[in-house]
Image (spheres, rainbow, N blue to C red):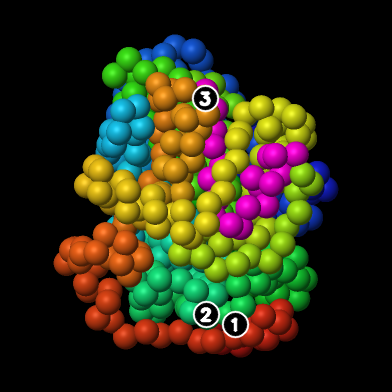
Amino acid sequence: MKFISTNKNSNPVTFLEAMRKGLAPDGGLYMPEEIPVLPDSFWSSLKELSFNEIAFEMAKPYFGEELSDEKLNSVINDAFNFPVPITPVEGNNFVLELFHGPTLAFKDFGARFMARLFSEQARKDQQEVTILVATSGDTGSAVAHGFYKVDGVKVCLLFPKGKVSNLQEQQMATLGENVTALEVEGVFDDCQRLVKQAFIDDELNSKMQLSSANSINIARLLPQSFYYAYAVSVLQKKGIEMPVFSVPSGNFGNLTGGLLAMKMGMPAKHFLAATNVNDVVPEYLKGDQFQPRDSVQTISNAMDVGNPSNFVRIKYLFGDSDSAIRDQITGYSYTDEETRETIREVFEKFSYLLCPHTAIGYRASKEYQTERGMKIPTVTLATAHPVKFRDVIETEINQEIDVPDRLKVWLEKEKKSTTIGCDFEGFKEFLINRA
Ligand SMILES: N[C@@H](CCOP(=O)(O)O)C(=O)O
């Protein structure tokens, strides 16, 4: 299978080549030339399969001869070794808990899958790779953890100074070794701009092999389609066939993963794009132009994105048709006050804790049901463990929440980070001389 750039101005490449490059040379994002559609017999018998069996069948067509079945299976079994519960919170509202991996966020799926592929690749290539990551919180933690001490790979994380939670910062900035943490005096979009500019800078690219572990990298994105199909398999066992998925969204890689699964044949009724006040996509879905703008800081910081990278992939998946996109996805956006209210209400009524991102997705599910019918089954993707946002949660529920021992360890570690400005030349100088 070949992968082409959404800007349509780069040569087609294989999956592993696309992974190594991160971003296409023309600045576009790689997508499969054709989306592989899996047979109906696969989708109708999902309930017979485990998470890893589903992942294998969904991943296999993308690799072709590039990766043996044995290797793919071992990557999958090693990467996805944690539970993925679906919790019924209220009526037909289910929460798909994607936060049981080592860094307690859904990014562990993509980062762990990709890190295992990369370590194999770096061994074969015998060439050091520097992975650049722009993060507003959770990606950085997952990538740092996934790639820590992987031979032949250096990781450079850029996050907006003072705009991530304490635990996220500790998870990113205390590891050292092959992981460098850069605090950028700006917002997430500045970090993302610096990283994208690095990929198209000739001098940098002649000096080092760069790649990305953000969802702009197809190898980070693909695994984010597996858990949607797994959710469908669990619901099939309950006699539910066509759920609506509500997806807390920032850079829109998570929603794109679900749409990719649907294009592969997965049964899904509809998708909800749930954002905080950084709502350029919900605005577009209502009929406006897609108009990126500077992000603003919120309590759901991992979604503070003003120019979501994966919007171009959503356009690609729907053949550039705005009306087809708007038929399939409804947008919702909420303020911090509404987010806080949802955390409080769900805890008071059901003793269930939502992180601020998941609360936004949950509220969108409820609003959609209120508008279209309370019996419609919805699955809200729970993107992070509430303990990662302890300060916000404890204020709302008025009690302390337990921090698991494995997390306390992070809080005690010493921070090792460097602060840089938003200018590209300063970042480039850092990469060449000090990274
Ligand atoms: N939500 C993000 C922003 C980057 O998103 P990604 O999915 O493209 O890596 C974060 O946690 O950093």
**Which element is circle 3 on?**
helix
Between discs 1 and 2, the one toward the N terminus: 2
Answer with the quarter of the image where residue 256 lies.
top right
Q: Dot 3, how many residues are within 10 Å of its Cα: few (below 14), some (14-19), or many (20+)? A: few
Residue in the foreground of this view, choosing between 213 and 259: 259
Answer with the quarter of the image where residue 328 lies.
top right
Could you tell me the amino acid type at mark 2?
Lys
The N terminus: image quadrant? top right
Answer whether residue 15 is magenta in the image. no
Could you tell me the amino acid type at mark 1?
Glu
State the image coordinates of residue 192 (x, y, percent, origin top left).
Answer: 63, 66
**Which element is circle 1 on?**
loop
Could you tell me the amino acid type at mark 3?
Arg
Do tag 1 and tag 3 residues touch (Cβ < 8 Å)?
no
State the image coordinates of residue 405 (x, y, percent, origin top left).
Answer: 16, 67
**Residue, far right:** 9
- Image disc number at residue 161: 2
Between discs 1 and 3, the one toward the N terminus: 1
- Image disc number at residue 283: none
**Which element is circle 2 on?**
loop
Task: Give the residues drawn in magenta, as a range.
Answer: 269-287
Looking at the image, is 115 positioned above or below residue 192? above
Which residue is found at the position 79% from the left and 46% from the top?
Answer: 289
Q: Which residue is mark 1?
A: 185
- Image disc number at residue 372: 3
Do tag 1 and tag 2 residues touch (Cβ < 8 Å)?
yes
Residue in the foreground of this view, choosing between 431 and 182: 182
State the image coordinates of residue 133 (x, y, percent, origin top left).
Answer: 55, 66
